[in-house]
Amino acid sequence: MKYTNATMDSRNIHAIGCDLSDARIQHVLNEITRLKSLARPVVCLPDLHIKDRTEAPSSFAAATRDTIVPDLTAPSVGCGMGILTTSLTKKDLDHQAFEQFYYFMRRDLGPRYGHLKNILLWLGLIERPKNTYDLSVKEFEDLIKRGAPMAVEKYNLPPQTLNHIENHGSVFTHDELDSLNLSDILPRISYRSGRHDLGYGFKGNHFLEIQYIEDILDEEAAQKWNLKKDQVVIMYHGGGGAVSYHIGRYFANRKKNTLKQKFALFILKALFHFGAPTKWKYATQRFRYYFFPRPFTEIPLSSPEGQRLLRATKASLNYSYGFRMAITKRITDSLRALYPKKDIETALLWDSSHNTVTREIIGGEELTVHRHTANRVFEGQPVIISGFNTTNSYLAIGQAQSENHLFSADHGAGTVIKRLKTHEHPERLVTHIYQTKSPFKQIVTHQTNEGIDHVTKELTSASIIRPVIRLRPLAVFKG
């Protein structure tokens, strides 16, 4: 599609250190800023960019009044990042330890299924084998309803873990739970696939990264969070999982899907949304919203379908929080298997989602805030800003003034790192990369920090965050 320069309403765009010259960005922002329910100027963060198969820009936030607009975030609501601290230091690790750790992370995964077995699975003719981190049907339903609190109990994590998750890892209200009908918001396949392989899924831009603290920039905050120089931490980017994938696609018609996927989804979605006569009275709205929507369709929250979509979105978030608690459990178990004679300590420092739709108080008014690859910022709490596997990443602390920017910060700096000129790191540091496809192992040389530093400085100048520590990658796990 050819894009022409669009006239954007700058009054409805709040740009923070980002590049708005791309015609595609101008075109999309022009559409978004014309939304009738837009309640505040949209926030365009330093790493703002357009992906080929998503509708809204990345590193972006928008608030609407009394509506929900699915296209303003990613197709899989709930994807997020977290940092787990350990009692290890960088001198405890070498390439052999990296390889063993990767083996232990992967040793309890179920088989991969092709199209035929997935169809048989959907029909209920076969079942997946149950492994250590998998869930029963009852546990699965409990995870959807309760989110991270259920996962913390299931995986015997310390109860205080919940204090280190945004929203304490659960977003349903008591009234919503009282009237929640899971069969109305969860496709059949979610029950089949969503119970298995929790805590693992590092495809695409998702990763598991072993890092160490290279520099401490804010001694007071670092001491409060029990962070020390050279301490090993593990950053993960994942979550979402099967349930978030399904909800994001059954409740929308997204660019992310290929033509072949859209054909299959049309049939599955029709069975899900119209499979019983009691659902036919909502047929007009559901066809308009999920099968043939206009870009950035505004769905009223006052409508039954708006409330159904909000409940499905919350189910996706709860599942994602629980999924990432399974990641922390796998990491802890793998480290203890790696060092059976050591008393390895781990603790969750912070976990948050960066693809979200949530109801929040902004300027004294309850609004629907949509974030696409943007972290929610809480005053005094950690904020993760990821670099590349060849650069530093930052851990920062949220500032009160972030409300002026919809409480939002970039989750990473990937596009800016690619765009700005960098040089080879003077110390010739390296990262070991392990993956399930060829090449199975790579060693890459580090580069200088122009991109990640630009993003961090812009967010600091806008009084959104204050940097606390600089992290340096040692090893990355993919696949």
Image (cartoon, rainbow, N blue to C red):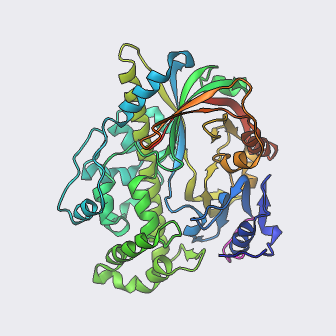
202 to the left or right of 271: right
Q: Which span is picked out in magenta? A: 34-41
Q: In front: 454, or 150?
A: 454
Total numbered circles: 0
Give left or right: position of 20 versus 299: right
In percent of the image, x 29 and y 78: which residue is there? Answer: 275
Which of the 4 image quarters holds residue 66?
bottom right
Q: Is residue 399 magenta?
A: no
- Classified by dominant secondary structure, the portion drawn in magenta counts as loop
Q: Quadrant of residue 298?
A: bottom right
Nearer to us in this view, 318 or 108 = 108
Determine the residue positioned at 38% across, 28% down.
334
Looking at the image, can residue 175 be seen? no
x and y percent of residue 270 in the render?
35, 78
Query: Furthest residue to the top?
Result: 341
Q: Is residue 100 left or right of residue 381?
A: left
